[in-house]
């Protein structure tokens, strides 16, 4: 497990490593990644789904049946669907967002990429993401997988996190810096 690094230390990391190993053995790494991306989008877009995975009162059977129905409606692959059932049976659905992040990191490491978490005030187009990825590749010297998020609170610009590095060119940060300088 050369690709696991320090991920295996956490509970969600252990689940992600198990899923990654099964996907690698079944040659479905990218298929599982697409299913997880669809689940990640569903969690971000649906307060009901987010509430479901964090519900402490849902029984294991009800959680399993609900996750099977959600997986069918989203169109997840069979391995991811079974994995969701395991999370439900083990009462670990609340770990799903962390498992998805850990899986993405494992996949990027496997492909020799680095992951960049990019926050913008408005959704970026595919063209903008591609251009940003090329720009970041020139800076870090490796392929960059961009995980784009939207946060209107930054007002404009971008906040880019690559590992422990952060590049903050948001208007909010610039305004805060200007306000601090004026108080001076």
Image (tube, rainbow, N blue to C red):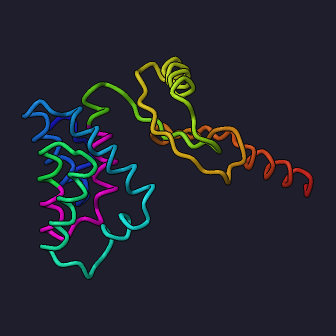
Q: Quadrant of the C terminus?
A: bottom right
**Quarter residue 31 falls in:** top left
Q: Position of residue 20 (x, y in %)?
A: 17, 41
Q: Residue placed at 25% from the left, 41% from the top?
A: 5
Where residue 89 sits in the image (x, y, percent)?
A: 12, 68
Residue sitting nearer the eye, 133 or 72: 72
- On the picture, is 157 further left or further right than 75? right
Magenta-colored stretch includes residue 170: no
User: Foreground residue, 164 or 82?
Assistant: 82
Classify 90 as above or below 120: below
Stretch in magenta:
84-106
Residue, x 28% and y 53% (percent of image)? 99
Q: Main secondary structure of the magenta part?
A: helix
Magenta-span inclusion, residue 102: yes
Q: Residue at x 13, y 34 (%)?
A: 24
Describe residue 37's horizontal placement relative to residue 84 as left or right.
right
Q: Quadrant of residue 158?
A: top right
Instruction: Depth check: give the residue in front, 33 or 5.
Output: 33
Residue 51 appears at what percent x and percent y? 37, 70
Q: How many marks?
A: 0
Q: Position of residue 142 (x, y in %)?
A: 41, 21
């Amino acid at each position: 497990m050369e690709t696991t690094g320090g991920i295996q230390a956490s509970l969600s990391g252990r689940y992600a490593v198990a899923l990654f190993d099964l996907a690698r053995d079944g040659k479905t790494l990218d298929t599982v990644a697409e299913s997880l991306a669809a689940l990640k989008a569903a969690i971000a877009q649906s307060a009901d789904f987010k509430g479901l995975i964090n519900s402490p009162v849902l029984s294991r059977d009800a959680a399993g049946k609900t996750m099977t129905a959600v997986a069918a409606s989203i169109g997840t692959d069979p391995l991811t669907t079974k994995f969701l059932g395991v999370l439900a049976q083990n009462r670990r659905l609340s770990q799903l967002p962390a498992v998805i992040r850990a899986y993405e990191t494992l996949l990027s490491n496997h492909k020799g990429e680095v992951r960049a978490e990019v926050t913008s005030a408005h959704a970026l187009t595919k063209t903008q993401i591609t251009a940003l990825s090329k720009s970041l590749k020139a800076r870090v010297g490796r392929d960059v997988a961009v995980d784009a998020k939207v946060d209107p609170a930054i007002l404009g610009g971008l906040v880019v996190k690559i590992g422990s590095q952060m590049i903050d060119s948001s208007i909010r940060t610039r305004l805060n810096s200007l306000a601090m300088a004026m108080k001076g």
